[in-house]
Amino acid sequence: MIIALVNSKGGVGKSTLAGNLAAWLHEQGHSVILADCDAQKSSSQWVQEAKPDIQVFHFANSDEILDSLPVLRDKADYIVADGPGSQTETSRALLMWADLAVIPCKASMFEARALAMNTAFVRQAQAIRNGQPDAIAVLTMVGRDYRLTKDMRDAAASLELTVAEAPIGLRQAYADAPGQATFVWKMGSSARDAAEEIDALFRELLPEACTENVVPMRRVRGRKKRANG
C-alpha cells in the first residue's frame, strides 16, 4: 500500500507525520519503506537515525516517482511517501500511484485556499484512476483557537473531503523527536499527549494495520474529558 502525504504548502507537518507513520507501522510488525520526495530530506534523515531498519528511498522529481515508486510495492507492506511543500508536479505524480492520500493542513485562515487546490489535485487523479486514491485531510498544529478548527472542517465539507476525527496538536514533542532521534511514544510522560493523539490518528487512518498497542491509552474518562474540553 502506498500512502502519500501531500500538500502544496510547506510547514504543515508532512514530514512529522511521515516519519512517525513509518515508525508506527514498523512497530506494528509491518515491512515499511519511506520514500522521501522532499529536497530537504528531513524525514529520511530522521528515520535513518531513529529506526535504521526502515528502508529509505529518495526521489528527486516527478519522473523518478512515476517510474520507480510502483516498483517498491513488491518490496514492503507499506510505502510512506513524504511529498514536498512546493513542487506541485511531484505531488501530482505521487497521487498517480498512491492508494491513500493524506493531506495535512493547519487550522488557520490561510489554509482554505491551499486545501481547495490540493483537493483539486486529488480529484484529477481520481478521475484518471477511476476513483483512486482515497483521500483524507488531517488537521495539524491545532492550537487553542477551536473556531479556526471548525472553519477548516467546514471548508473540507464544502469540498466533500473527509477530515480525520483525530487532530494533531501544536506540541513541542513533535519538534523535539527528530533531534533526539526518536519518536513521540518513546519520549516518556512529557510527550504522552502527543503519543496518544498520533496513535489515535494512525489507528483511524489504517485500522487494518493495527496489531498491538504502541502506546498505553488513558482511562476512558480522561479521554472524554479532554475531548469535550
Image (cartoon, rainbow, N blue to C red):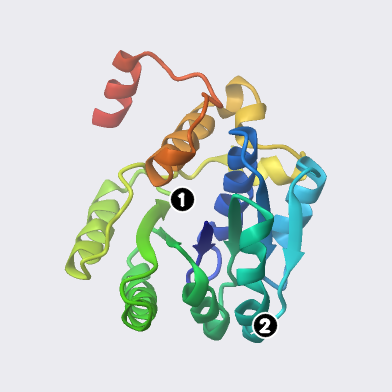
Describe the element under mark 1 as helix, strand or loop.
loop
Q: Nearer the viewer, residue 213 or 105?
A: 213
Query: Which residue, given by chain and number where applicable, does mark 1 sit on?
Result: 141
Whether residue 143 appears in this view of the structure is no
Q: Could you tell me residue 69's position as x and y percent?
A: 63, 71
Residue 92 on image: x %, y %: 49, 80
As shown in the figure, which amino acid type bears the numbered disc 1? Met
Q: Earlier in the sequence, mark 2 or mark 1?
A: 2
Q: Which picture quadrant has residue 172? A: top right
- Judged left or right of residue 163, residue 90 is right
Crowding at dot 1, Cα within 10 Å, few <14 / some 14-19 / many 20+, comes out as many
Q: Is residue 1 left or right of residue 144?
A: right
Q: Nearer the viewer, mark 2 or mark 1?
A: 2
Query: What residue is rendered at 60% in x and 63% in y?
Result: 82
Q: Do we see residue 194 in this rendering?
A: yes
Horizontally, residue 223 falls left or right of residue 71, namely left
Depicted 113 relative to depicted 72: above or below? below
* Residue type (three-letter) at the residue carrying disc 2: Asn
Q: Quadrant of the C terminus?
A: top left
Instruction: Please state the horizontal and vertical placement of residue 54, each as a whole percent of the image.
Output: 74, 47
The residue labelled by disc 2 is 61
Q: CA distance from mark 2 to mark 1?
A: 28 Å
